Amino acid sequence: MRAAWRLPWLLATALLLAGCGGHSGTRASSSSSYARSGNSGSGGFRDDTNLPQNSRYRSNSDSVPDGPPPDVSNLPEPVPKVEPRSLYGNRSPYTVLGHTYWVLPSARGYDERGIASFYGSKFHGYKTSDLEDYDMYKFTAASKVLPLPSYARVTNLTNGKSVIVRVNDRGPFHEDRVIDLSYAAAVKIGIWPKGTGLVEVQGIDPSAPPEQAVPPPPVVTATPEHPPGIYLQVGAFSDPANAERVAEQLRVANFAPVQVVDANIGGRLVHRVRVGPLADVDAADRVTSQIEQMGLPHPQVAVD
């Protein structure tokens, strides 16, 4: 459940607190002043964002509270509303661990399926990327691309449970994760205690007419006998011969099943090489590493 890869998020925080377009000349300075001014997180401790990430937090590893999970059934979900874009955490593009990300202009139209994770007590009370205090008992989330703040509905594709979250943080900077949920949100939709789950993330546009503002949960067709499948897309090729060549490499390496699936993208026929379905998230992570060790590109996760 605990994720060693959470550390890349920590390494990115200093970059993200530097802010967004148009004010880059003052962001590092104002961010440092904010940290030095003695602002405290919940519980009265001081979160000094000037400290290196390996000494900023009280604990070196993430965890969740002892005992049974909280009853989140009565916690109010955030009500989407139009909010000004945060001065912090919205710089675009930004680069973390060699990967460059572009922040979307709004959450409107955003709809992505993938793997969700969550983060807990290690970060409780510390500053998020937009300099709010992280509260693991509220329905919030971290995204690599949604603007801060914004809102989204997250639905667990395995059981159909959903929750509206307020996105106020950056992460998770694990290539194969689409969103990082607060502890409460993870409990609400059944991602806890396993730590990961297959989800659909739908952006919410509070400025849209009421009937369009909050998207309905996706229709969940998964059953215990036929859960949503995890696939790894190793490449998309215009030349079918190239697609078959990569597929054969994977078959020889005993990856199974390997498929070449045709798709029409922007009026172009492409041939996608996919491995799967895989048994679970752990299997997807393991196979991803093995594929990279073959010298092939990092595969993309697809959830169908």
Image (cartoon, rainbow, N blue to C red):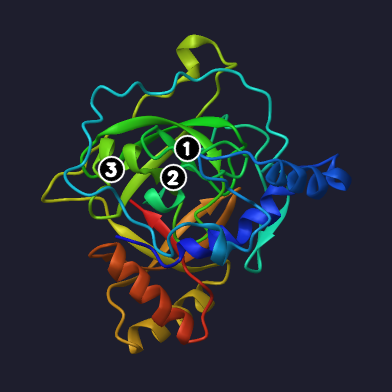
Marks 2/1 in contact by CB < 8 Å: the verdict is yes
Residue at label 3? 157
At horizontal 21% and vertical 41% (from top left) the residue drawn is 69
Q: Which tag, 3 or 2, sits closer to the chain's start?
A: 2
**Residue at 50%, 64% in the rendered image:** 7
Q: Amino acid at mark 1?
A: Ser
Classify mark 2: helix, strand or loop.
loop
Q: Secondary structure at mark 1?
A: loop
Taking 89 as reference, is 256 left or right? left
Q: Which residue is mark 2?
A: 124
Dot label at residue 42 = 1
Left of 270 or right of it: where is 113?
left
Residue at (22, 65) in percent of width and height: 279
Report x, y in % for residue 166. Answer: 48, 31
Nearer to us: label 3 or label 1: 1
Residue type at the position of mark 3: Leu
In the image, residue 8 sits, relative to residue 66, either above or below, namely below
Pointer 3 or 1: first along the chain: 1
Foreground mark, 3 or 2? 2
Query: In the displayed image of the protein, which residue is found farthest to the left?
Result: 225
Q: Amino acid at mark 2?
A: His
Q: Residue 276: x and y, percent?
A: 30, 67
